Amino acid sequence: MSKHAIWYLSFVLAVIFVDYIVSLVVERLNLKHVKTELPEEFVGFYDAEKYKKSQLYLRENTGFELIAETISVIITVAFILAGGFGFMDYFARQFGFGEIITGIVFAFSLKFLADFINLPFSVYHTFVIEEKFGFNKTTVRTFVADILKGWALGFAIGGPVLACVIWIFMKLGPMAWFYCWVSLTVIQLMLTFAAPVLIMPIFNKFKPLAEGELETAIRDYSEKLKFKMKGIYTMDGSRRSSKSNAFFTGFGRFRRIVLFDTLIEKHTTNELVSVLAHEMGHYKKQHIVWNMAVSVISTGLMLYILSFFIGHGSLFEAFRMKTVSIYGGLVLFGFLYSPINTILGIAMNHVSRKHEYEADEFAVSTYGKPDSMINALKKLSVDNLSNLTPHPFKVFLDYSHPPVLERISKIREMANIRS
């Protein structure tokens, strides 16, 4: 193996192990940071037994995730050192297809292998842990159907997109990364508009919210803010889990408000409108546009850096792949880009937490019911058995939302300032 190949291999293995060690450390810190005494803010919402249950849920999930991550690291390292990528490339080439089809076979073979390895962990998490703590509503039939639908979508969307990327890098020379960037940006925007209408209904049922107090309150608030939307819908979240949520999807007149049926069951009208006011705040504060812009820019950065490595023979040698290929370069580059992706993720989480505070402020200032917002956050935390006291390092690395106690404290400050 050449010196450059050894460098590539050493770098990739170092990244994998450093990421694993950091994960072990942060999860251990997070578990040790758990407070056995119920925070005063949640007295009356959490009883002692349920608060203890939330801590058990955290410990069991954390332990399970660490075991899964340990096994994943062992399998990944063994696969790399044993020449697994070279074998998969050899397998894909045996069919005698051209570069594009061979690339698709290679990529989907790797995906099938990864999904097959992850399947037992997914089954255990869904049907053992989530079942044990009263969250799971997924039947075996729904679980299997979701996997098959995911694969069908992968072929229908991922296959053509991958073919497009390979073709661009094959045909358009040094500026291929730029043309690929433009193409992926267009596809991303198209999928953003298509998802609410074509993709999401494949997995869940959406029904217009029935007329009544809640529907009237939401429409009145939306009209007050001149917030245009396609409609208000409920989603059968209870089909898979008892956990609850709400979200917006689409852009412009195609925006839709979506409420989990589990959310409607557990919250008052004022609490639900407060949650939606928060989501509207993300739109009004241009957070959605900002996220899209950052996503587009980061994709361009990734493709630009990729253009310097996609044909490096030493990179393929490090992974024991005998033939240099565009599709192989796309996959292998992911290992090199991982540290940059991690740094970008941490930065994005920091901005996201700031955006959450801004959306809370918008909800408080426009709807004017801070207590309803606070109660909604408390109920969501209790119903989902959320960790009320995560370690600051865990928040820094992984949290896209501020810890609930910090959000509540900020909302109270905002309400006092307004009054």
Image (cartoon, rainbow, N blue to C red):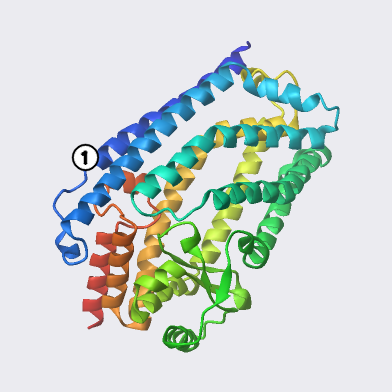
Side of 222 where 195 appears, left or right: right
Residue 181 at what x, y percent from top left?
Answer: 69, 50
Identify residue for label 1.
32
Question: Mark 1 Cα within 10 Å, few/some/many (few <14, many 20+)?
Answer: few
Residue 324 visible in this rendered orientation of the protein:
no
Quadrant of the rendered image containing residue 265 = bottom left
Residue 339, relative to residue 132: is it above or below? above
**What residue sits 57% from the left and 70% below the top?**
206
Side of 20 where 324 appears, left or right: right
Residue 122 at what x, y percent from top left?
Answer: 49, 41
**What residue sits 79% from the left and 32% below the top?**
102
Residue nearest the viewer, comparing 96 with 335: 96
**What residue sits 28% from the left and 52% below the top?**
387
Which three-letter amino acid code belongs to the residue tagged 1?
A: Lys
Side of 127 where 47 appears, left or right: left
The quarter of the picture where the N terminus appears is top right
Residue 336 at what x, y percent from top left?
Answer: 56, 31
Side of 117 where 397 appears, left or right: left
